[in-house]
Amino acid sequence: MKGFPEFALYPHMRAIFFPDVCVGCGHATVSAGRLVCVFCVDEQLAPAPPDTDLILPADVSDCRSAWQFDKQGTLQVLLHALKYRGLGAVGHELGQAAARCLSLPPACFVPVPLHPARQRARGYNQARRIAEGMVAVAGGEVVSDGAVIRTRKTRTQTGFDLLRRAENLREAFALVDPDVFRGRNLCLVDDVLTTGATLFELARCLREAEPASITLATLARA
């Protein structure tokens, strides 16, 4: 039994000793290798209600969020696992579920860039993992890394009002390769939408590339 080589020969033995469990609720998932169970997605995540107070910039035609953020609830647990526990696959799975929930059309998906220092610390960009999941369901492509970048390591937005968030993000992004975006239908992707300041600033930057359209999609609305 040294090294438990039998698990490679008998997968059912691995399932007994090391079952695939949901990050959100701790129960076994239906499919091997999945980190989020169907019950959590279908029953524990509340759909985001229409937001009549959010005023979109003139160059943004639509904004969609799949679920309402639930402080100390299942969605917060999943997002914490995605951003701080190194479980990037959670973002891919939630991106797939969100694309189905929102009926997203094919597009050029643009994840909000992280500052290089923050991405090195995290190991990946969580918005890119979400966007990759969305593309797997909706179709289209995720824009290549480096086409638009984050130039400043901004302070956390927690506790800021709309004006302070906008000031904190002013000119935080830079357009490197406009041709990638020109004439395309862009869908900008982030994990949580609070005031919209981050996505609005990214949209302002990308407007210079003259895309055909800009929409926004997030997992949660806070």
Image: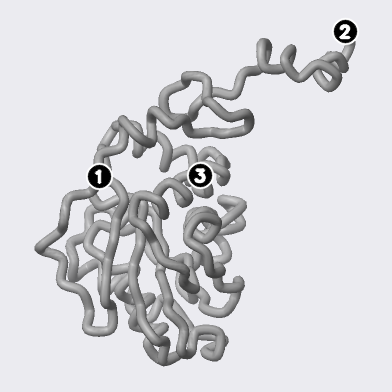
Q: Which residue is mark 3?
A: 93
Residue drawn at x 56%, y 62% is 117
39 versus 104 height, above or below = above
Using the image as rendered, state which of residue 148 and residue 144 is in the foreground.
144
Circle 1 residue: 47
Residue 1 disc label: 2
Compare residues 114 and 189 and report the one nearer the observer. 189
**Label 2 environment density (alpha carbons within 10 Å; few <14, some 14–19, many ≥20):** few
Q: Earlier in the sequence, mark 2 or mark 3?
A: 2
Left or right, residue 57 beside residue 93: left
Task: Say which element carries label 1.
Answer: loop
User: Label 2 vs label 1: CA separation?
Assistant: 48 Å
Vertical relation: 150 (above or below) 6: below
Instruction: Tell me if residue 221 comes above or below residue 213 in the rendering.
Output: above
Q: Residue at x 61, y 57 (%)?
A: 120
Q: Position of residue 57 (x, y in %)?
A: 22, 79
Crowd tier of the residue under label 3, counting other residues whose Cα lies within 10 Å: few below 14, some 14–19, many 20 or above: many
Which amino acid type is marked by label 3?
Glu
Residue 131 x/y as whole percent = 49, 59
Viewer-nearest of discs 2 and 3: 3
Estimate the spatial distance between the alpha carbons at disc 1 and disc 3, rounded to whole Å: 17 Å
Q: Amino acid at mark 2?
A: Met
x and y, in percent, of residue 144 in the image = 60, 73
Q: Earlier in the sequence, mark 1 or mark 3?
A: 1
Residue 161 figure quarter: bottom left
Would you call the spot at circle 1 few (<14 residues within 10 Å), some (14-19), or many (20 or more)?
some
Q: Nearer the viewer, mark 2 or mark 1?
A: 1
